[in-house]
Amino acid sequence: MTQTAIPFLFMRGGSSRGPYFRRSDLPADQDTLAKVLIEVVGAGHPNNIDGLGGGTAVTTKVAMLSSSDEDGVDIDYFFGQVGVDAREVDFGPTCGNILVGVGPAAIEMGLVKATGDVTKLTIRAVNTGALVETTVQTPGGQITYQGDTEISGVLGTAAPVGVSFLGVVGTSCGAMLPTGNLRDTIDGVEVTCMDVAMPMMIARADSFGLTGYETAEELDANTALFARMEAVRLKAGAMMGLGDVTRSVTPKIGLLAKPREGGTFTARYFMPWKTHPTMAVTGSQCLAACALTAGTVADGLADVPAGTPAVITVEHPQGTIAVTVDYTADSDGTVIKSAGLIRSARLIARGEVLVPSALMPTANT
């Protein structure tokens, strides 16, 4: 079998990892692109044994970068969530953890130049249209991955990468509360359907017979839980205007409980057919917005700090993640202006990945 080599960077972004490509090195046609990414990851096997994937949803993610034609935007970031067991790709959502690596990857690829000791970039998430401002440490005009920033779910420390998400409300569903309600009841479960950075169906953990403090492994072993959550999620997706979400990873699921370690609240995040080992960057913003909005399912659970911007600390299975939210709240409701986090990224490897030549066009248009 003849194979074609595609250059790539292999990077950790936040608490996820995967290959980062130049968009121009991949097929323009989305159906063909999906077939290529399935081969790159090795989707269709629980261990992704024939590809670069790591057998979990946080290690079967792909970033594709290009210089942006939009005024004021440096990089266009196109995301693909490749399946683990299933040979499929979802181009609907974006990923905030993988986005953390976009700034460093763009500099490594030569798509942008480092400017001084800190390089600031504006990134457009192609999947949703959201804009993100990021800061990358480039002392002396050279990118560095060494630093003192520690994030839960990742060993050691690294250089900080700042990300500030702008215009995150309603990017997928057209409104912060797509159903028009602070709470809906689906199959006897009270939920808040919300679209802030990521469309989510949010409920209290005890609504599903949980404490909210279970480990990811305990939750993944609970097949009855996933069957019940999926039934509710499918109906929530239709109510949110997302249509039939049977094969879509959105809306994601978040279950809330009271904090135990001094945070704002405890959460378990689902992707949606497996428990996230930590917490998604985009999901943390939606959950933070839920906590800051009076009348949602978070009422009575979240220990919300006074004032704005507010630092919302989400407790998750491996630690915490802090989100700084600039917002206003009055009798007319909550308005989310922006949400920012400090994360980290690291270049792990660079090289070429090989795919069947039959999948690659002779020229990309």
Image: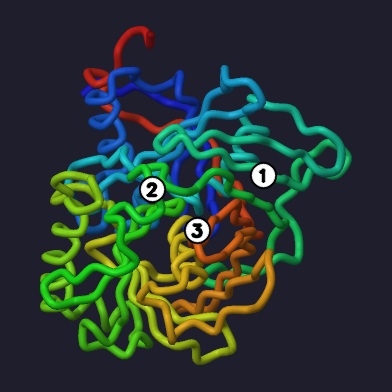
Residue at 65% across, 42% down: 133
Q: Secondary structure at mark 3?
A: helix
Q: Which residue is mark 2?
A: 175
Asked which quadrant contains residue 23, the reply is top left
Q: Secondary structure at mark 2?
A: loop
- The colour style of the image is rainbow
Q: Earlier in the sequence, mark 1 or mark 2?
A: 1
Q: For residue 51, say whether it is visible.
A: no
Asked which quadrant contains residue 111, the reply is top right
Determine whether label 3 and label 2 are within 8 Å by CB: no
Asked which quadrant contains residue 365, the reply is top left
Q: Earlier in the sequence, mark 3 or mark 1?
A: 1
Q: Is residue 191 left or right of residue 258?
A: left
Q: Earlier in the sequence, mark 3 or mark 2?
A: 2
Assess disc 2: are there few (<14), some (14-19) or many (≥20) residues with their C-alpha within 10 Å of its C-alpha. Answer: some
Q: Position of residue 104 (x, y in %)?
A: 65, 41
Q: For residue 186, say whether it is visible.
A: yes
Residue at 20% across, 41% down: 88
Amino acid type of the residue tagged 2 in the rendering: Ala
Q: Nearer the viewer, residue 135 or 237?
A: 237
Amino acid type of the residue tagged 1 in the rendering: Thr
What label sits on residue 134 in the rendered view? 1
Q: Is residue 89 left or right of residue 278?
A: left
